[in-house]
Each structure stands twice: as C-alpha cells, then as structure tokens.
C-alpha cells in the first residue's frame, strides 16, 4: 500500500512511518530533507500528494498541545484549520482512497450545558478538523475518519507528559504531586501506532475512533506510580481538564485495533527506563 504521512517528523509521525516501512509499505512524508512544505501552501501540498499517489493519507501535521497556544492563537488556527483544509482538499483532488485525520481528545476536555466541548484554542481547531472530515466524507468519494488521540506516552516523547513527569519525580525525588482537577486519557505510543496502522487497512471506517486505552484521574496515576517506587504523594489544585464525556477505552484487545493494549500499571517500568 502507498501511504503518505503529514507530520512524519513528529513524535507519532516518526513512529508510524517506521512501523509502516517495517511492514513493507511504500510510505513517504509530505516533506523531505530538501523540501519542507508548509501545509497551508495548498499548491505545494497538492503537488506532493499528486507525486506520491498514495492510497492512504495520515494527516498528523499541525501545532500540537494546548500548552503551546497561549501566545499565538492566530497562528494555531491558521495552521490547524487552514492547513488541514489544504491537506483534505488536495487528497480529494488526487483521488486518495482514505484520509486518517489525527484529531484530539482535547476537543472534549470540558463541558457546557452537559455537552462535551474544547477548553482551548487547540481543542477548537482539532474539532474543526473533525467537522471538516465529516463534510468531505459525505461530499466526496474519499473516505475520511478522525482518530481522537489521547495523551501519548512512551519512547520518543520529548515534550511534557504527566505520566513521565510523575515517574521522573518518584524516581529522582521520591515524591509526587498531582492535580486534583485533572483526568488523563492515555495511550502508549506503540498502541497508538498499532491503531493508526489498523485503521488505514480496514475495509471500511467509522467516522471517529478514540485512541485512548484508559482514562485515569491524576490521583489514580499518582497512587499507581507512588506505590511502585515508595514515593510520597501530595496534591494541589490547578487547571480543570476532566473529559466529562469519557471515551471508548481500549483496555483490552476486544476492539481488534490494538492487539495487546499496554496499561499504565504495566508501563511504569518502561517509563522509568526513559526518564
């Protein structure tokens, strides 16, 4: 299968590209070492997709993580909305069979009048991508599906992640402090990649999938990690991210998309070797 990945140099993109290459697929990134393509440049995106002639496009490019957006919301909206529109239109024009969009659980972090909603500009932009995917899926012959990716942890993670931070603090300092106001929808990097690969191969796809193996409170995470290392535990209040809607958790292989989901309690030793 011919596959193109946008955002192939990112945390998830690198792991996905390597897995697909290992499986023998003809896989390329949107950009290469000589030519870096801005996803907002629709003509350049179109040329790249036309040249690659992919069966499947995994769209992972964009500004990621709500903590990065406080200073330049306009840039975030431009990249994540206009850029996603450019990729989707180019894929349709090129006759791509399927587009797998890297959506985010951040679109469902809060609630208003009992309905789940985003609590950040980032979450808003990712929800826009979901709506855009629904539109193009119904209006064109290209299949679109949105994968709501949770907090991904494991090897290759360079930016902040609460699981990594708690393990690091327990190992190095013998103590953990957790936010009483947060839950974390999590997935191990290999499980996330397993899921994306599987969705690319399915005979047909659902409009959305939740890439979340478990949804734990930060207290539950702290207690699991603290008990493993004998660390003391304290709490504090902070930003409220509760994900009231919940997610379709992949705690077992019953869904068929993740062969053997790795839960936090079993991942702790692996993370300890990374921090």
Image (cartoon, rainbow, N blue to C red):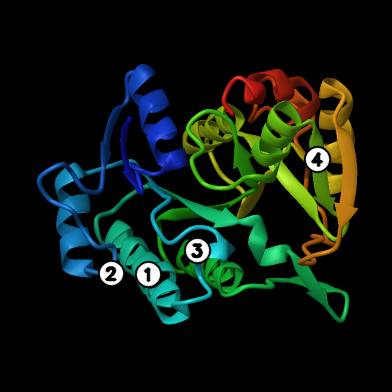
Residue 214: tell me if it is visible. Answer: yes
Q: Earlier in the sequence, mark 1 or mark 4?
A: 1
Q: Tell me where residue 207 sits by quadrant.
A: bottom right
Mark 2 and mark 4: Cα distance apart in space: 42 Å
Q: Which residue is mark 2?
A: 40
Disc 3 residue crowd, few under 14, some 14–19, many 20+, Cα 10 Å = many
Quadrant for the C terminus in the image: top right
Task: Look at the numbered discs 2 and 1 and tell me whether their residues touch, using CB distance below 8 Å.
Answer: yes
Above/below status of 179 relative to 78: above
The tag on residue 176 is 4
Which sits in the foreground, 32 or 20? 32
Q: Which residue is mark 1?
A: 79
Disc 2 residue crowd, few under 14, some 14–19, many 20+, Cα 10 Å = some
Disc 4 residue crowd, few under 14, some 14–19, many 20+, Cα 10 Å = many
Which sits in the foreground, 21 or 266? 266
Please tell me which residue is depicted at 20% across the width and 57% down the height of the picture.
37
Helix, strand or loop for disc 2: loop
Q: Position of residue 250 (x, y in %)?
A: 75, 35
Disc 1 versus disc 3: nearer the observer: 1
Q: Earlier in the sequence, mark 4 or mark 3?
A: 3
Q: Position of residue 162 (x, y in %)?
A: 69, 45
Q: Earlier in the sequence, mark 3 or mark 2?
A: 2
Mark 4 and mark 3: Cα distance apart in space: 40 Å
Above/below status of 131 relative to 197: below
Disc 2 versus disc 4: nearer the observer: 4
Q: Earlier in the sequence, mark 1 or mark 3?
A: 1
Please tell me which residue is depicted at 59% across the width and 73% down the height of the picture.
124
Q: Which residue is mark 3?
A: 133
């Amino acid at each position: 299968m011919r596959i193109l990945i946008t955002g192939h140099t990112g945390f998830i993109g690198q792991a996905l590209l390597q897995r697909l290459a290992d499986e023998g697929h003809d896989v390329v990134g949107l950009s290469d070492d000589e030519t870096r393509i801005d996803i907002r440049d629709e003509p350049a995106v179109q040329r790249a997709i036309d040249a690659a002639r992919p069966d499947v496009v995994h769209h992972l490019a964009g500004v990621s993580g709500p903590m990065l957006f406080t200073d330049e919301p306009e840039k975030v909206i431009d990249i994540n909305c206009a850029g996603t529109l450019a990729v989707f239109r180019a894929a349709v024009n090129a006759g791509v069979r399927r587009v797998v969009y890297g959506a985010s659980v951040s679109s469902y972090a809060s609630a208003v009048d009992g309905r789940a909603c985003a609590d950040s500009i980032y979450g808003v932009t990712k929800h826009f991508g979901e709506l855009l995917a629904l539109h193009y899926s119904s209006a064109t012959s290209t299949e679109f599906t949105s994968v709501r990716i949770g907090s991904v942890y494991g090897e290759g993670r360079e930016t902040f992640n609460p699981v990594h931070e708690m393990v690091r603090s327990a190992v190095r300092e013998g103590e953990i402090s957790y936010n009483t106001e947060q839950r974390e929808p999590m997935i191990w990097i290999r499980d996330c990649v397993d899921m994306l690969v599987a969705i690319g191969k399915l005979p047909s796809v659902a409009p959305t999938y939740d890439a979340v193996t478990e949804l734990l409170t930060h207290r539950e995470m702290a207690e699991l990690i603290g008990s493993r290392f004998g660390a003391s535990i304290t709490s504090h209040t902070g930003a409220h991210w509760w994900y009231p809607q919940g997610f379709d958790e992949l705690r077992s292989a019953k869904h068929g998309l993740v062969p053997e989901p790795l839960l936090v309690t079993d991942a702790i030793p692996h993370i300890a070797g990374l921090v």
